[in-house]
Image (cartoon, rainbow, N blue to C red):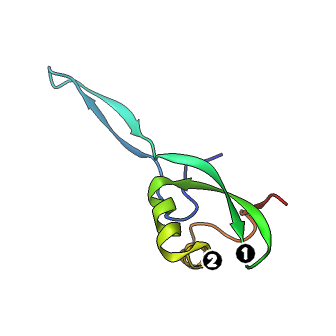
Amino acid sequence: MSKICQITGKKALRGNNVAHSKHRTKRSFDVNLFTKKFYYVEQDCWISLNISAAGLKVVNKKGLDAALCDAVAKGYCDWDSIKVIG
């Protein structure tokens, strides 16, 4: 499973660890990503999303349906990738 938020589209970035001697080695800046269950009122079911902390704030602000519609319109996820639990 890739480390991409299904609401905001955030993904892991690449960068450098910089030592005191300015020696640089590659590292990854991961997203604060977790799996969260939501009750989707419009479809009357539970869904599971891979969502970042920033994505959770978007869902709390806009609502689940509006956030999902925006994410699908921007191409961050599609309706087939949303896991329906029950």
Q: Nearer the viewer, mark 2 or mark 1?
A: 1
Quadrant in the rendering for residue 76: bottom right
Q: Quadrant of the N terminus?
A: top right
Q: Amino acid at mark 2?
A: Asp
Residue at 45 percent of width and 42 percent of height: 30
Q: Secondary structure at mark 2?
A: helix
Say above or below: 14 vs 63: above
In this view, the residue in front, 33 or 24, is 33
Q: Quadrant of the C terminus?
A: bottom right
- Percent x, y of residue 3: 55, 47
**Count of all numbered marks drawn on residues in the image:** 2
- Are the two marked residues, 2 and 1, in contact with CB atoms closer than 8 angstroms? yes
Residue 41, label in figure: 1
Residue at 47 percent of width and 46 percent of height: 32
Say above or below: 8 vs 67: above
What is the CA distance from the residue labelled 2 to the residue labelled 1? 8 Å
Q: Amino acid at mark 1?
A: Val
Question: Residue pushed farthest right?
Answer: 86
Crowding near pointer 1: few (<14 within 10 Å), some, many (20+)? few
Q: Is residue 43 left or right of residue 19?
A: right
In this view, the residue in front, 72 or 17, is 72
Q: Is residue 13 left or right of residue 66?
A: left
Residue at 53 percent of width and 68 percent of height: 59
Residue 65, label in figure: 2
Question: Residue pushed farthest top?
Answer: 21
In this view, the residue in front, 4 or 16, is 4
- Percent x, y of residue 26: 35, 32
- Percent x, y of residue 28: 41, 37
Q: Earlier in the sequence, mark 2 or mark 1?
A: 1
- Percent x, y of residue 65: 63, 77
